[in-house]
Amino acid sequence: MRIPKPLRNTSFVVGAVISLVVILCAVFAPYVATHGVEQMDMRNRFAGPSVNHWLGTDNFGRDLWSRTVFGARVSLTIAVISVFCSTLIGTVVGLVAGYFGGWVDQVLMRITDIFLGFPAIVLALAIVAVLGPGVLNVSIAIIVVAWTEYARVVRSTTLVLREQNYVQAARALGASPARILFREILPNALGPIIVLASLGLGTAIIAESALSFLGFGLPPPTPTWGWTLSYGTKFMRDAPWLSIIAGAAIMITVLGFNLLGDGLRDILDPRQLSRGEAKAGKAK
């Protein structure tokens, strides 16, 4: 039996498994967690990993496994919101700039360059400082610094696709620009967009964790990986597992999404497809 192409890609399979496990833990956090996320047990402060507390406890005796699982829900919620909106904004800007060109392209790309001119973390910190903490505000901060990458990638793809014969034929038949953009060009540009979005999930998780680590993310007692990593550094001698567990959760999740993105890039890359077909032809 022939194995489907995606299952032959190690990066895709490993990344998909890791991502799926993290997503399932986040979605079913109330059922996966073994303790209440705010349940304190001061007699077991800084308890190490045990049967009762799989990953140990923090300085208030709260179960780290439960807080890590709910932290996944917070991080993924912000990541999904920010990546979805960044993809939407960047795709529209890139499509319009690449298709129309001229002064439209110049104006949109100069606006994009202005946003790219600011250091991403500094701009995100400034936005959260003005808007205040919260899931929505942190998501807005990440969106503002992330949409530019999608815009530039989609623009470069659109510049190539707009010269293809099927686009020229649709234009000759009198199709409107909106129809050409969303019926002819966008479907053929989805490959790079999907790959960039999957990689963007990992980037968004790092950004949210960085903001929380610096004290600009969601305020305690909300369980976030960045905040756990931050206050865990104060207790590195007594309870090093606080920071280690939070850092490992961030690393494994980001690794999963990055491997997934790399696998999708290989699967959706037409050059890889052409090489595979050529090898199959030679084998025959």
Image (tube, rainbow, N blue to C red):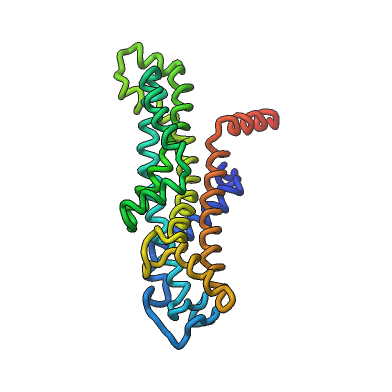
Eyeballing the image, is 269 above or below 214?
above
Residue 82: image location, x then y, percent: 38, 47
Q: From this viewpoint, is residue 184 visible?
A: no
The quadrant of the rendering that contains the C terminus is top right
Q: Among all residues in the image, which is located at the extreme right?
A: 283
Q: From this viewpoint, is residue 77 visible?
A: yes
Residue 115: image location, x then y, percent: 42, 37
Residue 140: image location, x then y, percent: 35, 48
Number of numbered tags placed on the structure image: 0
Eyeballing the image, is 113 above or below 38?
above
Q: Among all residues in the image, which is located at the extreme top?
A: 172
Snapshot quadrant of residue 43: bottom left
Q: Which of 24/111 is in front?
A: 111
Q: Residue at x 48, y 78 (%)?
A: 57
Q: Residue at x 48, y 27 (%)?
A: 156
Q: Residue at x 48, y 83 (%)?
A: 45
Q: Among all residues in the image, which is located at the extreme bottom?
A: 43
Eyeballing the image, is 105 above or below 86?
above
Snapshot quadrant of residue 282: top right
Q: Residue at x 56, y 79 (%)?
A: 238
Eyeballing the image, is 193 above or below 130?
above
Q: Which of 266/275 is in front?
A: 266
